[in-house]
Amino acid sequence: MAPEQDSSETTPTDDADGPPGESVTFDREGIRAGFLTCVPVAVGVGGYGVAFGVLARQAGLSVAEAALMSATVFAGAAQIVAVELWPDPLPVLWADPLPVLTIVATVFAINLRYSLMGAALQPWFRYLDPRQVYASLVLMADENWALTMREFQSGSRHGAFLFGTGVALWLFWVGSTVVGAVAGGVVGDPATYGADFILAAVFVALAVELWDGRSSIVPWFVALAVAVGTASLVPGRWYILLGGLAAALVEVIRYDG
């Protein structure tokens, strides 16, 4: 667990870029608040984890390998795509090699969005120890990032909130992967039970929480239009990053122009 930091050690001055007034803390209270807030969301993510476990087993991964992948990669969309690119059956010495470069490049493209998401929390992170920041970022996913942005925008000083939410997500994600991998031979295609829609439903619920009135319409629409428009034109999953970059560029033009 990341080291604690007393509130007296980080007292930012008032400025336009960071949270004014009180200190940003990294303590047990922030971790606890993040963990408890994220549990309901983590339960929903767990359903998606079960679906991944099933797909991983169908791709030829063992229960231990599927669990290890979830514990170290910790990125649902990237893991789903990776197992979809996995050869079936698994390659042997005299067969075609595992498409490592294709898998790595695709996962890299999907996860590049985290660079933008982490930058959005910089006004908080600037007052934390690097070890605390990196420990939080390792456990950052789309769902707990959205919860943390809501917490940040509310004026909270719980700098450990992201870390706490990440612990909750990680536990449910890895645990549900094991459940799905064990039941992989019984469940069959998770889409039959609508499990493939779980993540979309979670994102819709989080989007409602992040809605900030009419000012949100333009960047959201731009991100959607660019992502949909480039999905069929650009190979791989680069449309995810392109949609985010387009929305960010529009916001920079709107407020700096």
Image: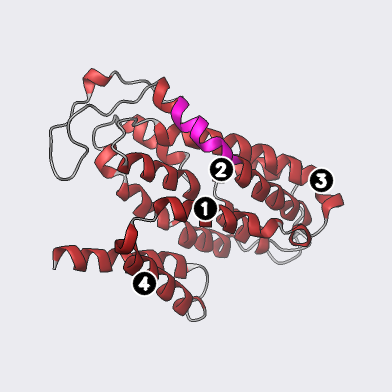
Q: Is residue 257 above or below residue 159?
A: below
Q: Which mark is residue 183?
A: 3
Determine the CA span between mark 1 and mark 3: 28 Å
Q: Secondary structure at mark 4?
A: helix
Determine the CA span between mark 4 and mark 3: 40 Å
Q: As drawn, is 213 to the left or to the right of 209?
A: left
Mark closest to the chain's N terminus, 1 or 4? 1
Residue marked by disc 2 = 41
Q: Is residue 15 above or below residue 204?
A: above
Mark closest to the chain's N terminus, 1 or 3? 3
Determine the CA span between mark 2 and mark 1: 9 Å
User: What amino acid type should be assigned to the residue bearing mark 3?
Assistant: Ala
Mark closest to the chain's N terminus, 4 or 2? 2
Residue range of the region highlighted in magenta in the rendering: 32-42
Residue 131 vs residue 93, the one in the foreground: 131
User: What amino acid type should be assigned to the residue bearing mark 1?
Assistant: Ala
Q: Would you identify the image quadrant in which residue 225 lies? A: bottom left
**Do tag 2 and tag 1 residues touch (Cβ < 8 Å)?**
yes
Mark closest to the chain's N terminus, 4 or 3? 3
